[in-house]
Amino acid sequence: MSGNTTFTMIKPDAFEAGFTGAILQKFIENGFKIKALKLTQLRKEDAEAFYAVHSERPFFNSLVAFMSSGPIVAAVLEKENAVDNFRKLIGSTNPADAAEGTVRKLFAASIERNAVHGSDSDENAVIESGFFFTHFDRH
Ligand code: UDP
Ligand code: MG
């Protein structure tokens, strides 16, 4: 069964460009409830840990430098089938391939600076939420 929460970050490119409000509005308009929200900045070692699965990829060092270069907004979002629905809303990793109306199509500049993160599985949504929030599901 698919879960009802996912984890997202508004990445440094989108935060710096002033898109935070518009992006959060997109999430809300598309039926996602904000369960936790935090403005913060990753240290280099935080970004390395968050993206450890990509540590052997050629883009890893550049990605880590980018993700720790400025503030990000981390959030836990709730909707039915959250992981899949959210990845549909944000669009393809490369904004050049992203469908019209998706967050990455609207707000991203490049495959690296692609505006937002979205979890790729229920398991990773839980791990990634725990990276930024303790007891994020308490209410
Ligand atoms: N990325 C990159 N170059 C690539 C592929 C990915 O810089 O060729 C960056 C991009 O910021 C992406 C992140 O690494 O969002 C994680 O990659 P992943 O394949 O998990 O894409 P996502 O799940 O974010 O769509
Ligand atoms: Mg991914």
Image (tube, grey):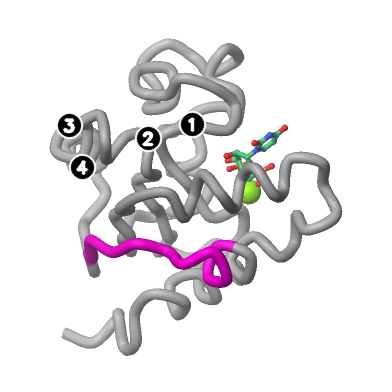
**Residue indicated by mark 1:** 114
Which x, y percent locates residue 10?
34, 46
* Label located before the other in sequence (1 or 3): 3
Kindly indicate whether the residue at mark 4 contacts the one at mark 3 (C-beta within 8 angstroms): yes
User: Pointers 2 and 1 in contact (CB under 8 A)?
Assistant: yes
Task: Work out whether mark 4 precedes mark 1 in sequence or the reverse, and give the earlier one.
Answer: 4
Element carrying mark 4: helix
Is residue 39 covered in magenta? yes
In the image, the segment drawn in magenta is 37-47
Closer to us: mark 2 or mark 1?
2
Label 1 CB less than 8 angstroms from ligand 1 = yes
Q: Is any atom of residue 116 visible in this view?
A: yes
* Cα separation between marks 2 and 1: 8 Å
- Which disc, if any, is residue 24? 4
Q: Are discs 2 and 3 less than 8 Å apart at CB?
A: no
Question: Of marks 2 and 1, which one's residue comes earlier in the chain?
Answer: 2
Decide which of tag 2 and tag 3 comes sooner along the chain.
2
Amino acid beneath label 3? Ala
What residue did someone put label 3 on?
22
Residue matched to label 2: 13
Q: Amino acid at mark 2?
A: Asp
- Vertical placement of residue 71 versus 24, above or below: below
* Relative horizontal placement of residue 77, taking residue 48 as reference (left or right): left
| Depicted 66 relative to depicted 126: above or below | above
Quarter of the rendered structure image containing ligand 1 = top right
Residue at left offset 35%, top offset 18%: 106
Q: Is residue 1 visible?
A: no
Mark 1 and 3 residues: CB-CB less than 8 Å, in contact? no
Q: Is residue 84 left or right of residue 133?
A: right
